[in-house]
Amino acid sequence: MDKFREAKALILVADFGSLAKAAVQENVTPAVISRRLDSLERRLGVKLLHRSTRSIKFTDVGIAFLEDCRRLTKEWDQVEDGISLGPREVSGYLNVTAPAAFGRIHIAPHATSFLKQHPKVKLSFNFTDKVLGFVQEGYDLSIRIGGTIDPNLVATELAVNKRVVCASPSYLKKMGMPKHPKDLLNHECLALNYRDTSSNAWHFQENGVPLQVKTHGAIDCNDGEILKNWAIDGLGLVWRSTWEVQNELHNGKLITVLDEFSIPGYNIMAVYPHQRIVPTKVKEFINHLKKIYTIEIPPPKG
Protein backbone atom coordinates (compact mmCIF):
# COMPACT_ATOMS: atom_id res chain seq x y z
CA MET A 1 0.00 0.00 0.00
CA ASP A 2 3.04 2.31 0.30
CA LYS A 3 3.17 2.64 -3.49
CA PHE A 4 -0.51 3.54 -3.57
CA ARG A 5 -0.06 6.18 -0.83
CA GLU A 6 2.88 7.67 -2.71
CA ALA A 7 0.92 7.87 -5.94
CA LYS A 8 -2.04 9.38 -4.13
CA ALA A 9 0.23 11.98 -2.53
CA LEU A 10 1.48 12.98 -5.97
CA ILE A 11 -2.08 13.34 -7.28
CA LEU A 12 -3.21 15.41 -4.30
CA VAL A 13 -0.24 17.76 -4.58
CA ALA A 14 -1.08 18.27 -8.28
CA ASP A 15 -4.78 18.83 -7.55
CA PHE A 16 -4.38 21.18 -4.58
CA GLY A 17 -1.10 22.89 -5.47
CA SER A 18 0.73 22.53 -2.15
CA LEU A 19 1.97 19.97 0.35
CA ALA A 20 -0.06 21.59 3.12
CA LYS A 21 -3.37 21.37 1.26
CA ALA A 22 -2.63 17.79 0.16
CA ALA A 23 -1.85 16.90 3.78
CA VAL A 24 -5.24 18.23 4.92
CA GLN A 25 -6.99 15.91 2.48
CA GLU A 26 -5.09 12.89 3.84
CA ASN A 27 -5.36 14.02 7.49
CA VAL A 28 -1.57 13.90 7.87
CA THR A 29 1.20 16.50 8.23
CA PRO A 30 2.93 18.15 5.24
CA ALA A 31 6.12 16.34 6.30
CA VAL A 32 4.42 12.99 5.72
CA ILE A 33 3.40 14.03 2.20
CA SER A 34 6.96 15.23 1.56
CA ARG A 35 8.42 11.88 2.73
CA ARG A 36 6.05 9.97 0.46
CA LEU A 37 7.12 12.05 -2.53
CA ASP A 38 10.81 11.63 -1.63
CA SER A 39 10.35 7.87 -1.36
CA LEU A 40 8.58 7.76 -4.73
CA GLU A 41 11.35 9.71 -6.47
CA ARG A 42 14.10 7.57 -4.88
CA ARG A 43 12.41 4.36 -5.94
CA LEU A 44 11.88 5.58 -9.50
CA GLY A 45 15.27 7.24 -9.74
CA VAL A 46 13.85 10.38 -11.39
CA LYS A 47 12.81 13.88 -10.40
CA LEU A 48 9.03 14.24 -10.60
CA LEU A 49 8.60 17.79 -9.33
CA HIS A 50 10.54 20.79 -8.12
CA ARG A 51 9.44 22.03 -4.71
CA SER A 52 10.06 25.35 -3.03
CA THR A 53 8.36 27.30 -0.26
CA ARG A 54 6.45 29.28 -2.88
CA SER A 55 5.65 26.89 -5.70
CA ILE A 56 5.51 23.36 -7.00
CA LYS A 57 6.40 22.63 -10.61
CA PHE A 58 6.17 19.20 -12.22
CA THR A 59 8.90 18.00 -14.53
CA ASP A 60 8.01 16.55 -17.94
CA VAL A 61 8.56 13.07 -16.52
CA GLY A 62 6.43 14.00 -13.53
CA ILE A 63 3.54 15.17 -15.72
CA ALA A 64 3.55 11.90 -17.68
CA PHE A 65 3.82 9.80 -14.51
CA LEU A 66 1.00 11.80 -12.89
CA GLU A 67 -1.38 10.81 -15.68
CA ASP A 68 -0.45 7.14 -15.20
CA CYS A 69 -1.09 7.49 -11.47
CA ARG A 70 -4.53 9.00 -12.12
CA ARG A 71 -5.41 6.15 -14.46
CA LEU A 72 -4.22 3.46 -12.06
CA THR A 73 -6.01 4.90 -9.03
CA LYS A 74 -9.24 5.11 -11.03
CA GLU A 75 -8.82 1.50 -12.11
CA TRP A 76 -8.30 0.54 -8.48
CA ASP A 77 -11.58 2.27 -7.56
CA GLN A 78 -13.31 0.38 -10.36
CA VAL A 79 -11.96 -2.95 -9.11
CA GLU A 80 -13.24 -2.20 -5.62
CA ASP A 81 -16.65 -1.31 -7.03
CA GLY A 82 -16.73 -4.46 -9.13
CA ILE A 83 -15.98 -6.95 -6.34
CA SER A 84 -18.45 -5.50 -3.87
CA LEU A 85 -20.96 -8.22 -2.97
CA GLY A 86 -23.63 -5.97 -1.55
CA PRO A 87 -24.65 -2.34 -1.14
CA ARG A 88 -21.49 -0.32 -0.65
CA GLU A 89 -21.23 3.14 0.82
CA VAL A 90 -20.24 5.62 -1.88
CA SER A 91 -17.07 7.53 -1.06
CA GLY A 92 -14.11 9.35 -2.56
CA TYR A 93 -13.52 12.51 -4.59
CA LEU A 94 -15.83 13.36 -7.46
CA ASN A 95 -14.55 16.08 -9.79
CA VAL A 96 -17.19 17.54 -12.09
CA THR A 97 -16.99 20.21 -14.78
CA ALA A 98 -19.90 21.93 -16.53
CA PRO A 99 -20.78 25.12 -18.44
CA ALA A 100 -20.73 28.07 -16.05
CA ALA A 101 -24.37 29.18 -16.11
CA PHE A 102 -25.78 25.65 -16.25
CA GLY A 103 -23.62 24.56 -13.35
CA ARG A 104 -24.63 27.56 -11.27
CA ILE A 105 -28.36 27.04 -11.90
CA HIS A 106 -28.80 23.29 -12.28
CA ILE A 107 -25.89 21.50 -10.57
CA ALA A 108 -24.57 23.45 -7.58
CA PRO A 109 -28.02 23.74 -5.90
CA HIS A 110 -28.28 19.93 -5.81
CA ALA A 111 -24.93 19.28 -4.13
CA THR A 112 -26.48 19.47 -0.67
CA SER A 113 -29.07 16.76 -1.29
CA PHE A 114 -26.46 14.50 -2.90
CA LEU A 115 -24.07 14.85 0.03
CA LYS A 116 -26.88 14.09 2.48
CA GLN A 117 -27.37 10.79 0.67
CA HIS A 118 -23.62 10.14 0.32
CA PRO A 119 -21.81 11.91 3.17
CA LYS A 120 -18.45 10.25 2.44
CA VAL A 121 -18.20 11.76 -1.05
CA LYS A 122 -16.20 14.95 -1.54
CA LEU A 123 -17.41 17.06 -4.46
CA SER A 124 -15.32 19.45 -6.51
CA PHE A 125 -16.98 21.57 -9.23
CA ASN A 126 -15.38 23.61 -12.00
CA PHE A 127 -17.99 25.65 -13.83
CA THR A 128 -16.44 27.17 -16.94
CA ASP A 129 -17.29 27.86 -20.56
CA LYS A 130 -13.76 26.97 -21.63
CA VAL A 131 -13.36 23.73 -23.57
CA LEU A 132 -11.47 21.35 -21.28
CA GLY A 133 -9.69 18.10 -21.96
CA PHE A 134 -11.44 17.00 -18.82
CA VAL A 135 -10.01 13.47 -18.63
CA GLN A 136 -6.44 14.76 -18.94
CA GLU A 137 -7.17 17.39 -16.28
CA GLY A 138 -8.43 14.84 -13.77
CA TYR A 139 -12.21 15.27 -13.97
CA ASP A 140 -14.46 12.27 -13.44
CA LEU A 141 -17.51 13.72 -15.15
CA SER A 142 -18.37 16.50 -17.58
CA ILE A 143 -21.82 17.94 -18.25
CA ARG A 144 -22.21 18.88 -21.93
CA ILE A 145 -25.01 20.68 -23.75
CA GLY A 146 -25.26 19.50 -27.34
CA GLY A 147 -22.22 19.10 -29.56
CA THR A 148 -20.37 16.00 -30.72
CA ILE A 149 -18.89 13.50 -28.29
CA ASP A 150 -15.48 11.85 -28.63
CA PRO A 151 -15.93 8.12 -29.38
CA ASN A 152 -13.64 7.31 -26.43
CA LEU A 153 -16.19 8.88 -24.09
CA VAL A 154 -19.60 7.68 -22.88
CA ALA A 155 -22.57 10.07 -22.93
CA THR A 156 -25.70 9.59 -20.82
CA GLU A 157 -28.75 11.76 -21.51
CA LEU A 158 -29.84 13.86 -18.53
CA ALA A 159 -32.45 16.08 -20.19
CA VAL A 160 -33.39 17.70 -23.50
CA ASN A 161 -32.73 21.35 -24.28
CA LYS A 162 -34.35 23.62 -26.85
CA ARG A 163 -33.64 27.18 -27.96
CA VAL A 164 -36.62 29.55 -27.89
CA VAL A 165 -37.23 33.20 -28.76
CA CYS A 166 -39.04 35.02 -25.99
CA ALA A 167 -39.92 38.47 -24.70
CA SER A 168 -41.91 40.13 -21.94
CA PRO A 169 -45.66 40.71 -22.37
CA SER A 170 -45.04 44.48 -22.17
CA TYR A 171 -42.54 44.40 -25.06
CA LEU A 172 -44.84 42.32 -27.28
CA LYS A 173 -47.79 44.59 -26.49
CA LYS A 174 -45.73 47.61 -27.52
CA MET A 175 -43.86 46.22 -30.54
CA GLY A 176 -46.17 43.46 -31.75
CA MET A 177 -45.76 39.72 -32.15
CA PRO A 178 -43.29 38.54 -34.84
CA LYS A 179 -44.97 36.06 -37.17
CA HIS A 180 -41.89 34.95 -39.11
CA PRO A 181 -38.16 34.88 -38.23
CA LYS A 182 -37.49 37.62 -40.79
CA ASP A 183 -39.77 39.92 -38.76
CA LEU A 184 -36.95 40.01 -36.20
CA LEU A 185 -35.22 42.56 -38.43
CA ASN A 186 -37.85 45.05 -37.21
CA HIS A 187 -37.37 44.20 -33.53
CA GLU A 188 -34.89 44.87 -30.75
CA CYS A 189 -32.94 41.62 -30.35
CA LEU A 190 -30.73 41.11 -27.32
CA ALA A 191 -27.72 39.10 -28.49
CA LEU A 192 -24.52 37.73 -27.02
CA ASN A 193 -21.62 39.90 -28.09
CA TYR A 194 -19.02 37.26 -28.85
CA ARG A 195 -16.20 38.62 -31.00
CA ASP A 196 -17.43 36.34 -33.76
CA THR A 197 -20.23 38.41 -35.36
CA SER A 198 -22.04 35.20 -36.34
CA SER A 199 -23.20 35.03 -32.71
CA ASN A 200 -25.86 37.54 -33.76
CA ALA A 201 -27.30 34.91 -36.07
CA TRP A 202 -30.37 33.18 -34.65
CA HIS A 203 -31.18 29.78 -36.13
CA PHE A 204 -34.58 28.45 -37.19
CA GLN A 205 -36.10 26.01 -39.63
CA GLU A 206 -38.96 26.43 -42.07
CA ASN A 207 -40.54 23.29 -43.55
CA GLY A 208 -37.46 21.37 -42.45
CA VAL A 209 -35.05 23.79 -44.16
CA PRO A 210 -32.52 25.64 -41.96
CA LEU A 211 -33.06 29.39 -41.75
CA GLN A 212 -30.63 31.91 -40.27
CA VAL A 213 -31.44 35.50 -39.34
CA LYS A 214 -28.82 38.12 -38.46
CA THR A 215 -30.37 40.08 -35.61
CA HIS A 216 -29.80 43.67 -34.52
CA GLY A 217 -30.35 45.60 -31.32
CA ALA A 218 -29.32 48.69 -29.41
CA ILE A 219 -27.74 46.70 -26.57
CA ASP A 220 -25.85 43.42 -26.25
CA CYS A 221 -23.83 41.57 -23.61
CA ASN A 222 -21.60 38.53 -23.12
CA ASP A 223 -23.72 37.20 -20.24
CA GLY A 224 -26.91 35.24 -20.95
CA GLU A 225 -28.36 35.90 -17.49
CA ILE A 226 -28.16 39.64 -18.09
CA LEU A 227 -29.81 39.26 -21.50
CA LYS A 228 -32.67 37.36 -19.88
CA ASN A 229 -33.15 40.06 -17.24
CA TRP A 230 -33.18 42.76 -19.92
CA ALA A 231 -35.88 40.82 -21.75
CA ILE A 232 -37.95 40.63 -18.56
CA ASP A 233 -37.55 44.40 -18.26
CA GLY A 234 -39.02 44.82 -21.74
CA LEU A 235 -35.87 45.82 -23.64
CA GLY A 236 -36.26 43.27 -26.42
CA LEU A 237 -36.37 39.64 -27.57
CA VAL A 238 -33.87 36.96 -26.54
CA TRP A 239 -32.98 33.57 -28.01
CA ARG A 240 -32.13 31.38 -25.05
CA SER A 241 -32.14 27.77 -23.88
CA THR A 242 -35.23 26.42 -22.15
CA TRP A 243 -33.16 25.51 -19.08
CA GLU A 244 -32.32 29.21 -18.68
CA VAL A 245 -35.82 30.70 -19.04
CA GLN A 246 -38.27 27.96 -18.04
CA ASN A 247 -39.14 29.55 -14.69
CA GLU A 248 -39.90 32.89 -16.35
CA LEU A 249 -41.98 31.15 -19.01
CA HIS A 250 -43.90 29.33 -16.30
CA ASN A 251 -44.68 32.46 -14.27
CA GLY A 252 -45.52 34.55 -17.32
CA LYS A 253 -42.62 37.01 -17.12
CA LEU A 254 -41.58 35.84 -20.59
CA ILE A 255 -43.60 34.52 -23.55
CA THR A 256 -42.21 32.46 -26.43
CA VAL A 257 -42.73 33.44 -30.06
CA LEU A 258 -41.95 31.76 -33.39
CA ASP A 259 -42.26 28.31 -31.79
CA GLU A 260 -43.26 26.72 -35.09
CA PHE A 261 -39.87 27.73 -36.52
CA SER A 262 -37.74 26.37 -33.65
CA ILE A 263 -34.83 24.07 -34.44
CA PRO A 264 -34.98 20.54 -32.95
CA GLY A 265 -34.00 20.01 -29.35
CA TYR A 266 -30.67 18.50 -28.34
CA ASN A 267 -29.39 16.59 -25.33
CA ILE A 268 -27.90 17.73 -22.07
CA MET A 269 -25.44 14.93 -21.35
CA ALA A 270 -23.28 13.52 -18.60
CA VAL A 271 -19.99 12.50 -20.22
CA TYR A 272 -17.28 10.28 -18.73
CA PRO A 273 -14.42 8.07 -19.95
CA HIS A 274 -15.19 4.68 -21.41
CA GLN A 275 -14.36 2.24 -18.61
CA ARG A 276 -14.89 -1.42 -17.91
CA ILE A 277 -16.59 -0.56 -14.63
CA VAL A 278 -18.07 2.90 -14.06
CA PRO A 279 -17.22 4.15 -10.54
CA THR A 280 -20.21 4.07 -8.21
CA LYS A 281 -19.79 7.74 -7.28
CA VAL A 282 -20.14 8.70 -10.96
CA LYS A 283 -23.23 6.52 -11.47
CA GLU A 284 -24.88 7.83 -8.31
CA PHE A 285 -24.32 11.47 -9.22
CA ILE A 286 -25.69 10.93 -12.74
CA ASN A 287 -28.78 9.18 -11.35
CA HIS A 288 -29.22 11.97 -8.80
CA LEU A 289 -29.32 14.62 -11.54
CA LYS A 290 -31.55 12.55 -13.84
CA LYS A 291 -34.22 12.19 -11.14
CA ILE A 292 -34.17 15.92 -10.42
CA TYR A 293 -34.18 16.95 -14.08
CA THR A 294 -37.35 15.00 -14.88
CA ILE A 295 -39.10 17.73 -12.89
CA GLU A 296 -36.65 20.64 -13.08
CA ILE A 297 -35.94 20.42 -16.83
CA PRO A 298 -38.99 18.69 -18.35
CA PRO A 299 -38.93 17.78 -22.06
CA PRO A 300 -39.69 20.85 -24.20
CA LYS A 301 -43.04 21.00 -25.94
CA GLY A 302 -43.16 20.65 -29.68
Image: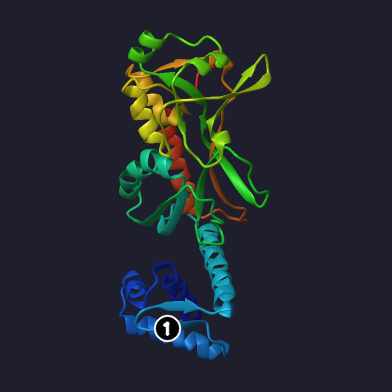
The image position of residue 155, as x and y in percent, is 59, 43
Answer with the quarter of the image where residue 65 lies.
bottom right
> Quick one: label 1, few (<14), some, or many (20+) residues within 10 Å?
few
Answer with the quarter of the image where residue 223 lies.
top left
Q: Is residue 206 shown left or right of residue 246? A: right
| Residue toward you, 174 or 257 | 174
| Residue toward you, 293 or 200 | 200
Picture layout, residue 148 above or below residue 252: below
**Under tag 1, what secondary structure?**
strand
Task: Locate the C terminus by quadrant.
Answer: top right
Picture layout, residue 115 above or below residue 257: below
Picture layout, residue 279 above or below residue 143: below
- Asked whether residue 296 appears in the rendered view, the answer is no
> For the residue marked with disc 1, what is the amino acid?
Arg
- Asked whether residue 113 appears in the rendered view, the answer is yes
The image position of residue 89, as x and y in percent, is 40, 55
Residue in the picture at 50% in, 40% down: 194
The residue where tag 1 is placed is: 51
The image position of residue 173, as x and y in percent, is 36, 8
Picture layout, residue 3 above or below residue 271: below
Q: How many labels does the image show?
A: 1
| Residue toward you, 263 or 169 | 169
Residue in the picture at 36% in, 22% down: 235
